[in-house]
């Protein structure tokens, strides 16, 4: 059976930390779908189409990684794409508590899908999309925190 992981998130923007989780996840899964959710309570920096395009470009040379967008429950999206796993990155203990609760609810709603958590590598622990959005919105240089080759201005 093919192991298909959905890596859900808003990815606004997709950072080097996200990229690292995907690359490490490729050692575990046959295919990873970076599933960019439409988050109703967040004010996005990038349009959903730009985020899908960015992730697609980052992994354009790897046919085991695809990008897609979805609205609604992640478990419904997992059913739609026949996912076997959900992949999540954990930076802090607070992330773990939050992700654990979601994973337990998801498991009740969709028992066939396992949640897999990868700890963020130490150098990526402080990086999060909220801080990177703030740097970009205020004209700072966020290139250190974005995957190589990403020109964020082309996605704004």
Image (cartoon, grey):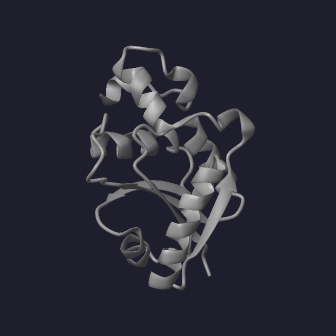
Say above or below: 125 vs 75: above
Residue 25 shows in the view: yes
The image quadrant of residue 70 is bottom left
Q: What residue is shown at x 53% (from left), y 55% (from top)?
A: 65
The image quadrant of residue 87 is bottom right
Q: Give the left or right position of residue 1, taking residue 7 as reference.
A: right
The image quadrant of residue 35 is bottom left
User: Which quarter of the rendered picture does the C terminus lie within?
Assistant: top left
Estimate the x, y position of residue 11 in percent, counting from the top left: 43, 45
Q: Give the left or right position of residue 142, taking residue 123 as reference.
A: left
User: Which quarter of the rendered picture does the N terminus lie within?
Assistant: bottom right
Residue 87 shows in the view: no
Say above or below: 112 vs 153: below
Estimate the x, y position of residue 105 in percent, counting from the top left: 48, 76
Estimate the x, y position of residue 43 in percent, counting from the top left: 27, 40
Q: What residue is shown at x 65% (from left), y 61% (from top)?
A: 117
Q: What residue is shown at x 40% (from left), y 26% (from top)?
A: 134
Closer to the camera, 69 or 115? 115
Closer to the camera, 139 or 79? 139
Q: Give the left or right position of residue 69, taking residue 105 as reference.
A: left
Labels in figure, total: 0
Estimate the x, y position of residue 29 in percent, counting from the top left: 64, 65
């Amino acid at each position: 059976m093919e192991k298909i992981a959905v890596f859900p998130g808003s990815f606004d923007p997709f950072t080097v930390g996200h990229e690292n989780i995907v690359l490490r996840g490729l050692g575990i899964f046959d295919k990873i779908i970076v599933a960019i959710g439409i988050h109703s309570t967040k004010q996005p920096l990038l349009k959903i189409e730009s985020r899908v395009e960015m992730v697609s470009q980052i992994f354009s040379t790897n046919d085991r990684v695809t990008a897609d967008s979805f609205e609604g429950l992640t478990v419904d999206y997992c059913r739609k794409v026949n996912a076997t796993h959900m992949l999540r990155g954990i930076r802090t203990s607070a992330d773990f508590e939050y992700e654990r609760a979601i994973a337990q609810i998801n498991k009740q709603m969709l028992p066939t899908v396992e949640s897999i958590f990868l700890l963020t590598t130490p150098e990526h622990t402080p990086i999060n999309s909220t801080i990177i959005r703030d740097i970009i919105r205020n004209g700072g240089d966020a290139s250190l925190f974005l995957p190589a080759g990403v020109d964020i201005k082309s996605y704004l």
